Each structure stands twice: as C-alpha cells, then as structure tokens.
Image (cartoon, rainbow, N blue to C red):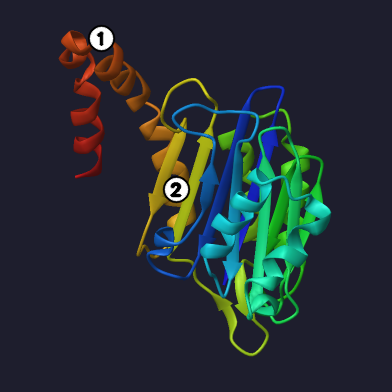
Amino acid sequence: MTYTVLASNPDTNEIGIASTTITINFSRTFPVHRHLLPEMTDKGIIVAPMATIHPQNGYKLCDLRDAGVSWDDMEGELEKQDENWSWRQIGAVTTSGETWVRTGTDAWDHASHIMADGSIAMGNFMGGPEPVKAMAKALEDNRGESMDERLLRALEAGKAAGGQGQPDLGPVPESWAMIQVFNGQQPWPAVDVRVDFDVDPVPKLRRLVTQLKNMDKVLHTMSYNPSKTFDVYGVVFDMYNAQV
C-alpha cells in the first residue's frame, strides 16, 4: 500500500528516497540505509522494503552486498532466507548510481516498478500502473533539480496520477509520508522529514521540507560553533510560531 521513489546523483554526491502510504507509523520499518552516516562512502545504499514488508530483507540485502554478492545473485540469496518472498517488493539504490528492484508475484495488486539510470519508481496496492509511470517520468524530467525537489515532484506526480487504491475499493488516502536525502557534507542527513497520521501528508511534507531548511544553519552552529547557537536560534521560534 505504498509508492516510493529512490534516486542517486553521483555528480552532486546526493542520494535519497521519498515515500507515502496509508500505513501509519511506517517509519518503524522503512527505509533501511547503510554507509551514509556519519560519513558517506562509495558503498552507501538506501533500501526500500515494501508491500507486505519485512525490514529484515533490507538489512540482509546490505549484508549480502557488503559480502560481495552480485546484483545478479541477490534475489536468489534473499529468497533462500524468506519463505514469503513472493509477497515482497524491494528496491535499492547506491551512491554510485547502481539500482536493483524486484516486485513479487503476490505483492498487493496493482504492483510494479520502473528502473532508470540511477533511479527507481515503485508501488503496490494501486488501481493501475499510472502512478509508477508518472513518478518515473517526473524523476527523469527533473534530473537537473536538487535531490529533495526531484523526489518531491516525483512523489507528487504519483499522487496526482491516482496514488493508492484498488478497482473494488477505489482511491485510498495516504496518512504517512517521508523524505531522506544524504550528501556527505555533515554527519546527519541533508533532509530528513516525516509526516505521520495525517489526512494529507504529501503537501505537508513539501511545506515542512521548505521550512526546515532554515534549521541547517542552527544544526551547523550547534555542532561547530556552539557559543553562537543563540545568535541563530531565533529561526526555531519563528517556525514554531508559524505553526500555531
């Protein structure tokens, strides 16, 4: 019941993921990443385990990749360790732009994925392939944008194309959304925002991403020039007052 976009841009040293679903508190199990914090390395990876999710598959994928298992052999190795493999949907992107994705035959229909150069659009529990197609197109059309903007536009395109749903149920609303972007410039994500238990989380996700960029200066000051923290901390109160 989820649709997701992942992308990597080695030229700008950015890698990220954005996702939305009706499942509340989905961040307890999603996504999985490794070798991105506190430093981004050439082994950096983000994994999106979806459909009837088992996050252990994300960690196993990372372990297998660290052990040198090839992408060609990855599915077979994961399937050996998961008796419910046919119910899973899982995708991965790396800092170097490698991509890998699989959609199980029992993943909630409609389920599909589209993989392009350094990006993946994927989803399940949809009325048809249109949301995934729209997200894939948006990922390609917005390659020149910053990673957070590119991912947000793709997620918004998926929602506009129908989002979640089934033919017998019709559209299903989202209640959770997230975005994470890593760029290796600090020991925390460049963007890390979640909206949970909300009636319209995708628009709110965009508003928060825009507002919370004001926190960049605060976080850097607290970490590297702590005596000046309250010289810049006023932005926190400004954002708080804007919400109440």
According to the image, label 1 marks what residue? 225
N-term-proximal mark, 1 vs 2: 2
As drawn, the residue found furthest toward the bottom would be 168
Identified by mark 1, the residue type is: Asn
The number of callouts visible is 2
- Is residue 184 among what the camera can see? yes
Q: Check whether the beta carbons of the residues at disc 1 and disc 2 lie within 8 A of each other.
A: no
The location of residue 153, given as percent across then percent down, is: 62, 44
Q: Which mark is residue 205?
A: 2
Mark 1 residue element: loop
Between residue 208 and residue 110, name the one nearer to us.
Answer: 110
Looking at the picture, which amino acid does disc 2 mark? Leu
Residue farthest along the front direction in this orientation: 67
For this view, does 64 lie left or right of residue 179? right
Report x, y in % for residue 161.
68, 62
- Answer above or below: position of 173 versus 152: below
Residue at 61 percent across and 42 percent down: it is 45
Q: Is residue 122 left or right of residue 164?
A: right
Label ID, residue 164: none
Q: Residues within 10 Å of mark 1 (few under 14, many from 20)?
A: few
Estimate the spatial distance between the alpha carbons at disc 1 and disc 2, rounded to whole Å: 30 Å
Relative to 37, say whether 175 is above or below: below
For the residue pair 126 and 12, the one nearer the viewer reads as: 12
Residue at (56% x, 49% y) in the render: 18
